[in-house]
Image (cartoon, rainbow, N blue to C red):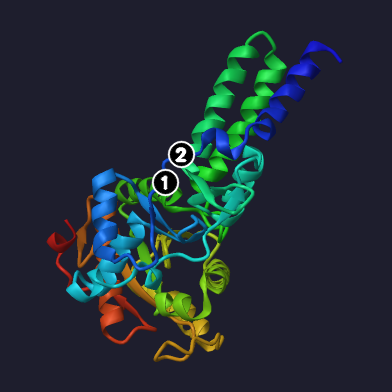
Amino acid sequence: MDIVSAKLKHSETIMTNLQLKDVMTANVVCVQPDTSLQNIFQTLAKNNYSCCVVASDNRIPLGILTERDLIRIISEQGLTAELMSAAVPEHMYSPPFTLPADTSLDEVLNLQENRNVKHLLATNIAGEIVGIVTLSDVVKAYNHVVKQQTKNLEKTVIQRTQDLERVNKKLTTLSMRDALTGLSNRRAMEVDITRVHAASIRHGRPYSVILFDIDYFKKYNDHYGHQSGDTILKLVADHFRNGVRESDAVYRFGGEEFLLIMPETDLDEAMIPVQRIVESLYNSKTLHIKSPLEYISTSAGIACSIHEGEKITAWRKVVELADIALYKAKNAGRNQALTAQSSKLNAAS
């Protein structure tokens, strides 16, 4: 085997040789199942951690609760004494994703790409938690490997080019695409909408932004489970993707929210296809027994870059106007699309 082939083989096996235990954080905050959300807040704040693990007395992981989960719970239910005294199992993600600590980093990366796993628990042979690793930890490890290999391959142009192409493709997929739904993610949306907004300003043509939110999705997750919830997210993503024009682009904006950009489209032109998307999703009769509407449905808020005759100077204001319209649709009973007409621009500043 020549030196170039040897280096290529070495590069391909580095991520396989590295293991979960090589990048995990061993200092994990574990709490008992009867711990209140109030104590969870205090524990995370005291240790400056982003999540905690709910575990039994013998450190068998039962669930996980992140700082992001806590913010979402409070935004949905309000900061009340009753909520703060609730036990953590009512809100934790269970069962958590676990892997043996000797799992190769290449397998971990593939899992996090395919399942969109943000926090992964490492366990020993007895199933006890021994560490935690995040997507950022794996990506940093991957980047470190790439940098080291690039230094070693400076004299071999072919090898260096092949490595960089492979790594860039994987990192681009991680950073610009939502692994669960296959849609472009929020980061990609910001890149695209910046370009669309600049073209709108340059040519004086409108574009519309639509925010969708799956109605009563938390109740669906709570009743059917997170795996079924993931299935619904993929189903809805496919529905949006198949319901838009070739010139339009749909993104997973976050959680159960999706964003649609419609270039060269004003409010009236956007309303017709958006209403069709909302109505056809509900008419697909996907059962949701915990929803007052009985079936999976979505609410939508529509905003335009030319708002009541005035050009909006920043694309974030267009998105925020769409968010205002979305809340109008939800407050009006959900399963419908409403526009941001009559909403003040300074409300979106």
Q: 28 and 272: which one is in front?
A: 28
Determine whether 129 is above or below 267 in the image.
above
Q: Quadrant of residue 93?
A: bottom left
Mark 1 is surrounded, within 10 Å at the Cα level, by few (under 14), some (14 to 19) or many (20 or more) other residues, namely some
**Would residue 99 appear left or right of 120 to someone viewing this image?**
right
**Would residue 38 appear left or right of 136 to someone viewing this image?**
left
Label 2 vs label 1: CA separation?
Answer: 7 Å
Is residue 81 at least partly visible in the picture? Answer: yes
Q: Amino acid at mark 1?
A: Val
Determine whether 266 is above or below 334 in the image.
above
Q: Amino acid at mark 2?
A: Thr
**Would residue 229 appear left or right of 202 to someone viewing this image?**
right
* Residue ID at (64%, 30%): 165
Q: Contact, CB < 8 Å: mark 2 with mark 1?
A: yes
**Which residue bears the numbered disc 1?**
28
* Residue ID at (15%, 63%): 347
Q: Quadrant of residue 67?
A: bottom left
Mark 2 is surrounded, within 10 Å at the Cα level, by few (under 14), some (14 to 19) or many (20 or more) other residues, namely some
Q: 325 and 112: which one is in front?
A: 112
**Image location (x, y in percent) of residue 115:** 58, 56
Q: Residue furthest front?
A: 57
Question: Residue 53, which numbered label?
Answer: none
**Would residue 70 appear left or right of 243 to someone viewing this image?**
left
Q: 8 and 130: which one is in front?
A: 130
* Residue ID at (28%, 52%): 43
